[in-house]
């Protein structure tokens, strides 16, 4: 601690495990807070922080459902809502937000593997894709990646083959959305998707 009450970092720090693009360089000064944490004085690109938060959630999801931090889930849900609103108002910003959108698509794919996926986050990601589609932005890649996750209702290949062998007709798999809606319908009466 310095005489003026600040602390100085002796070596580079990387606050996000998923990226080295955000770092606090050695020599950065910060203010020691009452709770023991440090508020560093530096300039940083806020969009890089949002991208890093999404990347961290992806990393947590790949490590297993139990590794997901609730505060990270809340942050990424807010990020997804922000991106959805920006694209709704300014569709031309989709290219600039492409990295975050791609990261959120990967989050969506991984959330489909979780036993109880967070409905609010899935709804926000689907809203992003809907806004892209409404704005005639290239959402084809996003839509096809979402279609492959099992999130949306679909006919599976096995069900299609069974239809050829039987006359009972194909059955539609409701996907994660169908199951979530049924659960929400029964319990809360809310339909965010």
Image: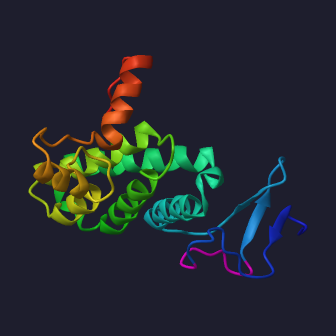
Task: Name the residue: 54% across, 47% down.
Answer: 73
Viewer-proximal residue among 64 and 126: 64
**Visible in this render: residue 122?**
yes
Question: Residue 92 at what x, y percent from top left?
Answer: 17, 60
**Relative horizontal placement of residue 92, taking residue 174 as reference (left or right):** left
Magenta region, main secondary structure: loop
Q: Nearer the viewer, residue 55 or 66?
A: 66
Q: Quadrant of residue 180?
A: top left
Q: Which one is in front, 77 or 182?
A: 182
Query: Residue 166, image x and y in percent?
Result: 14, 46
Residue 149, above or below 48: above
- Name the image quarter holding the N terminus: bottom right
State the extent of the magenta-drawn residues as a range.
20-27
> What residue sits 32% from the left and 48% below the top?
151
Task: Look at 56% across and 63% down and name the residue there.
Answer: 56
Q: Is residue 90 visible?
A: no
């Amino acid at each position: 601690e310095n005489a003026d009450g600040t602390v100085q970092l002796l070596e580079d720090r990387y606050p996000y495990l998923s990226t080295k693009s955000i770092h606090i360089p050695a020599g950065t000064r910060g203010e020691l807070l009452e709770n023991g944490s440090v508020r560093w004085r530096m300039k940083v690109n806020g969009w890089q922080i949002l991208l890093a938060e999404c990347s961290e959630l992806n990393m947590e999801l790949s490590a297993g459902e139990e590794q997901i931090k609730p505060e990270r889930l809340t942050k990424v849900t807010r990020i997804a809502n922000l991106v959805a609103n920006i694209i709704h108002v300014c569709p031309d910003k989709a290219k600039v937000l492409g990295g975050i959108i791609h990261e959120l698509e990967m989050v969506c794919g991984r959330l489909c593997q979780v036993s109880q996926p967070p409905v609010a986050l899935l709804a926000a990601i689907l809203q992003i894709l809907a806004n892209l589609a409404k704005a005639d932005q290239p959402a084809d890649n996003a839509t096809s990646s979402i279609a492959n996750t099992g999130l949306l209702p679909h006919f599976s290949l096995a069900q299609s083959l069974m239809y050829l062998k039987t006359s009972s007709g194909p059955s539609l798999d409701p996907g994660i959305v169908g199951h979530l809606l049924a659960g929400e319908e029964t319990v809360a009466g809310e339909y965010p998707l």
